Amino acid sequence: MLVIQIVALIIAIVCWSIFFHMFRKDRSRYRNCYVLFITLIATMMFIVVLPGEEYFIGVFCIMLMALVVFLLVVPFFFIFNGIVMIKREGKHLAHMLSLALGVAILLGEVVTFIQLVIYSEASWETMDKYSNSVVSLLLLIFSMTVIYGSMEFLVFMIYVLFLQVVPKGKNFDYIVIHGAGLLGGDRVSKLLSDRIDKAINIYKKAPNKPKLIPSGGKGDDETISEAEAMKRYLLEKGIPEEDIILEDKSATTYENLKNSKAIIDGRWGSKNTALVTSNYHVYRALRYARKIDLRCTGVGSRVAFYYWPSALIREFIAIQTEKKHALLFVGGWFILASGLYMLWR
């Protein structure tokens, strides 16, 4: 057992070393999500064998039961969250994502359970006939799709959460604040004020007073730009006007970053930059920053708990629909589907 413990410890240490090397090199790489997930699994394996042979079965059973409970609770959590989201934010398609995911996971679990029951109770003849039916194939594809998609989302979610707990530096020269829609055309929303407050907090903790760059143009339903509304909020909070640089021409996250980078590149001195947005949006913002070669540290502001799941699902979909990730997602699904189908047959 001691040999197994040592091997498990070495594997966990190696995994963490590889992950932190990749994470330190570039936090925006999607492969970091998978490496972190594998690292956590390796760590859990070490935890299981750590107590020794006497307690191995007990610890393993506890962790297995915890996993089962988690799988059963997750769909109901998303369904409940979706209902709350719709009640508070309205019946918009984007607000129904949490509910849709919860229903899909629940149906996937039910279909998987039914198929397992059929195969465990049926005779060999019945089993063979069922395996060759179109219904069996369709149910298998549906079940596998839900499981595969849920695992992809879980891997993504864990990494996004990890980004929030990683210690951030304090010595910044610029703080870019991502805009968001205004209330009544000229007032900052709760979502946006939370971003600004986070930026102010960073500003006050910085040893040198960095420049704040509120970023966001004027939408069709807005009377002033988001950057101007943020500037007014900053001035009300006591931030000196000379420490505020407006970027009021952008309409998207990518333009926010591109225009802000142009401002930073056009100034002298060091350019250590903090990128402040809502916590669910940090990872995608970092991906855009890498595309334009903007070296920055992503900092997330808090959002209402009920809002976070649907917002994170939107981020996940946005990333998976990128051409490269769409191909990888479909390719991974196809390989898994082919393998399971062969086993099923």
Image (cartoon, rainbow, N blue to C red):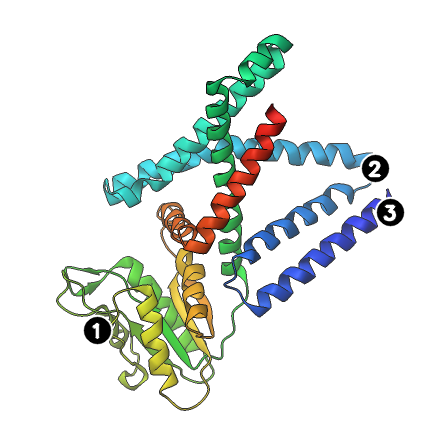
Query: Badge 3, how many Cα within 10 Å: few under 14, some, many 20+?
Result: few
Going from N to C along the chain, the mark reached first, 3 or 1, is: 3
**Viewer-side residue, 335 vs 218:** 335
> Mark 2 against mark 3, which lies toward the viewer?
3
Query: Badge 2, how many Cα within 10 Å: few under 14, some, many 20+?
Result: few
Q: Position of residue 207 (x, y in %)?
A: 47, 83
Q: Are marks 2 and 3 in contact (CB under 8 Å)?
A: no
Q: Secondary structure at mark 2?
A: helix
Q: Which residue is mark 2?
A: 53
> Which mark is drawn over residue 228?
1
Which residue is drawn at the image coordinates 78% and 36% (left, top)? Answer: 56
Q: Secondary structure at mark 1?
A: helix
Q: Which residue is mark 3?
A: 3
Which residue is drawn at the image coordinates 40% and 50% (left, top)? Answer: 312
Q: Position of residue 155 (x, y in %)?
A: 53, 48
Q: Which three-letter amino acid code belongs to the residue tagged 3? A: Val
Which residue sits furthest right? Answer: 2
> Mark 3 against mark 1, which lies toward the viewer?
3
